[in-house]
Amino acid sequence: MRKACSLSPVLALVLGLALASLADPAGAQQKSGGSPPARAPQAAPAPPPPPQPSPPKPYKPVAVQLPAVVNDPSFEAFRKDLTGVAQRKDRAALARMVVAKGFFWEREDGKPAPKKSGIDLLAQALNLPAKDGSGWEALAGFAAETTAAPLPEQKSILCAPASPVFDERELEELAQTTDTDPLEWGYPIRADVEVRETPSASAPAIAKLGMHLVRVLDDDAQSTANTGGEWLRVVVPSGQIGFVAADALASLTGAQLCYTKEGAAWKIAGIVGGE
């Protein structure tokens, strides 16, 4: 067995001072007349995780009345032409369908619209340069909308799609009793939309939606991850979860394309939504 070696008094004192400086480097430097070391910047605290959605529960249906279809043959013809422009991805033709002056863009983020021409603002809002063609598809979707309603502050401008009619106080109560956000609720675009057991048209129907608000769950679930956005998970009034074709529901806060009539010709006057 090896014997423990003993330290000389001087070596012990030096070692003790060294250990003390490691344990309290600032104090050791202050004692020796040096300046304390700069503190390393502390990392910013991690942001809190997003709140988890409330679990599904039964709810009292809030009745919804669909908006009226615009009964104007000239508007229908204009929408048909707009559909053709979107299918051809014809920006030059689209530019001729936009008002020359006064185009507006009410952005989702509340920021003022850039100072650009109407066609440039519309292209930016719809992301028309996107390689996947999603912007032109969105434009075609707007063109397919048969409903429109005047802007409250400017009756000469129609925005499509029009919002449904429902009691906003009942929606507030609905959100409170289900511990949800009003943005989680949508509505069927027709009566008797079938709710399927799984995201498949051949799956058994578990319910039919009446003309009322319906809760739409987030689309991050594994069950809808590979459906290409064609299905939505919903909660029916009984509290049961099912699946509905995405094109059978509409949002309460979706984007709108707005139109005005200049003489006998319709023009695109602005857009609500987008960033």
Image: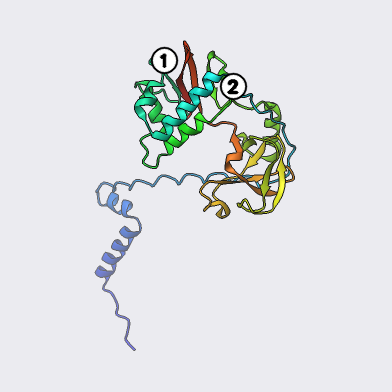
| Residue 117 horizontal/vertical position (percent) | 35, 21
| Residue 89 horizontal/vertical position (percent) | 38, 33
- Between disc 2 and disc 1, the foreground one is 2
The image quarter in which residue 70 lies: top right
Mark 2–mark 1 Cα distance, whole angstroms, equals: 23 Å
Q: Nearer the viewer, residue 224 or 215?
A: 224
| Residue 272 horizontal/vertical position (percent) | 49, 25
Q: Residue at x 43, y 35 (%)?
A: 87
Q: Which residue is mark 1?
A: 102
The image quarter in which residue 98 lies: top left
Q: Amino acid at mark 2?
A: Val
Q: Are marks 2 and 1 in contact (CB under 8 Å)?
A: no
Q: Residue at x 60, y 26 (%)?
A: 163
Q: Which residue is mark 2?
A: 70
Q: Which mark is residue 32?
A: none
Q: Quadrant of the C terminus?
A: top left
Crowding near the residue tagged with mark 2, few <14, some 14–19, many ≥20 C-alpha atoms within 10 Å: some
